[in-house]
Image (cartoon, rainbow, N blue to C red):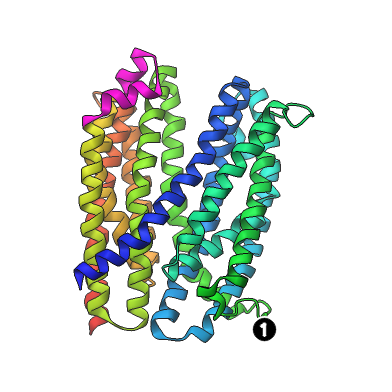
Amino acid sequence: MLARQSRLILAHATPVLFAQLGSMGMMVIDTALLGHFAAEDLAAVAVGGGLYIAIVFAFAGILQAISPTVAHLHGAGDEAEIAGAVQQALWLALFLAIPGILLLRHPDLLLAAADVDPLVATKARGYLGLLAWGMPAVLLYRSFHAFCNALGQPRPLLLISVASTLLHGVLASLLVNGLWGGEALGVLGCGLSNVIVSGCALLGAAVYLHFGQSVRRYRLFASWQAPRPAMLAQLLRLGLPMGLSHFVEISSFTLIALFVARLGATVVAGHRIVANLAAILYMLPLALAIATLAQVGQAAGARDWPRAEASIGAGLLLAGVLSTLAGLLLWLLAEPLTAAWSDDPAVRAVARSLVGYVALYQLFDAIQTIAAHALRGLRVAFVPMLVHVTCFWGVGLFGGWWLAFSSDEPMGAAGFWLASLLSLVLSALLLVGLLKRTLDALRL
């Protein structure tokens, strides 16, 4: 059974991985275009983009509750209930879009905390104001994203991701540089392109849900239901801790970047290179974790605990081995990789001094990611959220601050990365222990 579940997880995770890398490609496009346009616009998309990602992932994390919900219904054979659950998730997405729009339209407190140049803040404010209008489409699409993953059908996500990245590349190029025949919009062009692409992605999702043969039998748009408070409350009980976990993880790295800024431009640049490499490597265990959640959720819905255990074992084994190999590869290729990101010898030296921490923590990051998603597949989210808050904010962020600045021998940026390593080790141990106790309890 372990071999079979491993094949299922790999078949699901592979297109998810490429879809995620495609989404990251949109950020790469923005950075490349604005890097050749103006430094202030590049800084604006860096600051505004960081805030936008933190807000979107927090709300999108709440909507991930639909994934274990649908997986359980599918595993239990209650497919007639799936349409109602998805419809309530779409209502929840629209409700969550309201505070999302308000935060993006009124970001002054967030920008003040970043303490950026007034011109950069003005450009970031305009960029976020545009992105606000795409928030409903983004959150509705995230519900579709969670639904497809719950059923183990990620290929539409890959196709939409690739098409979105290509469309964004064309639109952003035209709008940023004025090639569309009007004014060169700079960072606003990236924002406008993102809004248009979000709408197109949602349209593609709607077409698939209506015409796709594999999902047509669920009749998701038939007998449309009004908001049901009981179902919405059920989704929120599961989704709120999931959303907070997402926010804690993302915000911890965002805040580290702000704290490192006091160490000077060279250290910031070196840290940013390593942070980008870490983000790319994280896509691998995350894709495997999403696939593991679906398999565990379906097995739990069917109350097939041997299958659930086999899925968890397969996910841990695959993520542990592949992420360890990725970390080893990063260590061996540290010199050419850092050289590809920067021509400055001092920046490259800083990056090389930090790469070892990222290479070392890949195993523990993979284990804690799989364990957290497996627990979500079992519809356990509150205690994992507490673990993430304790580890990522307590050990990783505040522990990193102490190691970086306040210890007897301040470590600088390396202190944050050492604390991040320790936080992931602790998180992995706690979540695996919780996962084992949860499975033991469910088998009784």
Residue 15 showing in the rendered view: yes
Front residue of this view, candidates 341 and 399: 341
Residue located farthest toward the right when viewing the structure as drawn: 182
Tell me which corner region of the image, top left, top right, bottom left or bottom right, holds residue 183: top right
Q: Residues within 10 Å of mark 1 (few under 14, many from 20)?
A: few
Front residue of this view, candidates 355 and 176: 176
Residue 125 showing in the rendered view: no
Decide whether residue 202 is among the magenta residues: no
Residue 401, above or below 246: above
Front residue of this view, candidates 25 and 374: 25
Say which residue label 1 marks. 223
Tell me which corner region of the image, top left, top right, bottom left or bottom right, holds residue 420: top left
Which range of residues does the magenta coloring cover?
A: 332-351
Rendered location of residue 299, percent (x, y): 32, 77
Residue beneath the point at 33% across and 24% down: 338
Rendered location of residue 279, percent (x, y): 39, 41
Tell me which corner region of the image, top left, top right, bottom left or bottom right, holds residue 403: top left
